[in-house]
Image: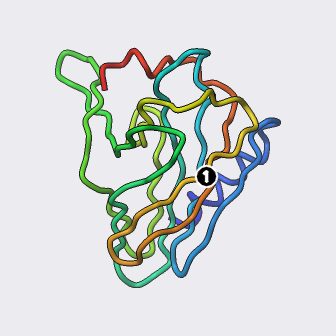
């Protein structure tokens, strides 16, 4: 899985506006935490990243706090038999020992609902990641170019 994290960093380094950054604490590395720039007037946005656990025990992400949104929650995307993708809140995300978990569009992600101010490409948004086994980790989300999806109209 370490190769996956390296592939993510290599891909991000090729993107002009998206400069990869990461935060490391103990055995956990949070790789390129970012928010795709929401449309003007959007009330919500989605955040993505990769989380690598180089430790010997599993770690569980149980939440993210940021002043940029009134509510944040961990979500996953479930694809129904009707072919429709639906976002569902989840209580936590397990990062197994020696593995990398990727939060990405169409999969697990963080929802920021009730944005407290506009988010513009290039902004850095302070946040605190809450892990069960190791406590808080201070991180900054980078606001990347838009992904073309209006997350405020997705029925979260």
Name the colour scheme.
rainbow
Give percent across and percent down for residue 18: 74, 40
In this view, 56 is above or below 60: below
**Residue that appears at 69% across and 45% down:** 124
Q: Quadrant of the C terminus?
A: top left
Furthest-bottom residue in this view: 56
Image point (47%, 60%), residue name: 129
With 56 as the anchor, is 12 left or right in this view? right
Q: Residue furthest right?
A: 16
Which residue occupies the extreme left position in the image?
81
- For the image, the number of numbered tags is 1
- Residue 126 pos. (x, y %): 61, 52
Question: Considering depth in this image, is 155 or 4 the residue closer to the camera?
Answer: 155
Task: Tell me: residue 5, above or below residue 77.
Answer: below
| Along the line of sight, the residue nearer the viewer: 67 or 48 | 67
Position of residue 57 relative to residue 103, above or below, is: below
In the rendered image, which quarter is residue 133 located in? bottom left
- Residue 46 is left or right of residue 142, and the answer is left
Q: Nearer the viewer, residue 31 or 98?
A: 31
Query: Which residue in the structure is indicated by mark 1?
Result: 126
Image side of residue 86 versus residue 71, left or right: left
What residue is drawn where x is 52% and y is 68%? 137
Residue at image location 44% in from the left, 57% down from the top:
101
Q: Residues within 10 Å of mark 1 (few under 14, many from 20)?
A: some
User: Please, is residue 38 above or below residue 133 in the view?
Assistant: above
Quarter of the image where one finds residue 75: top left
Percent of width and height locating residue 71: 38, 40
Is 59 on the left-hand or right-hand side of 20? Answer: left
Q: Secondary structure at mark 1?
A: strand
């Amino acid at each position: 899985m370490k190769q996956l994290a390296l592939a993510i960093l290599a891909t991000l380094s090729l993107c002009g506006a998206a400069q990869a950054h990461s935060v490391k604490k103990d055995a956990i590395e949070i790789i390129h935490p970012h928010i795709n720039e929401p449309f003007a007037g959007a009330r919500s946005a989605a955040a993505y990243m990769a989380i690598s656990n180089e430790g010997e025990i599993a770690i569980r992400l149980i939440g993210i706090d940021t002043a940029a949104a009134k509510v944040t929650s961990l979500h996953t995307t479930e694809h129904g038999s009707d072919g429709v993708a639906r976002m569902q809140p989840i209580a936590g995300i397990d990062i197994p020992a020696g593995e990398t978990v990727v939060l990405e569009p169409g999969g697990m992600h963080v929802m920021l609902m009730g944005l407290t101010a506009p988010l513009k490409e290039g902004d850095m948004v302070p946040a605190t990641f809450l892990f069960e086994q190791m406590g808080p980790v201070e991180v900054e989300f980078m606001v990347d170019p838009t992904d073309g999806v209006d997350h405020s109209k997705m029925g979260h």
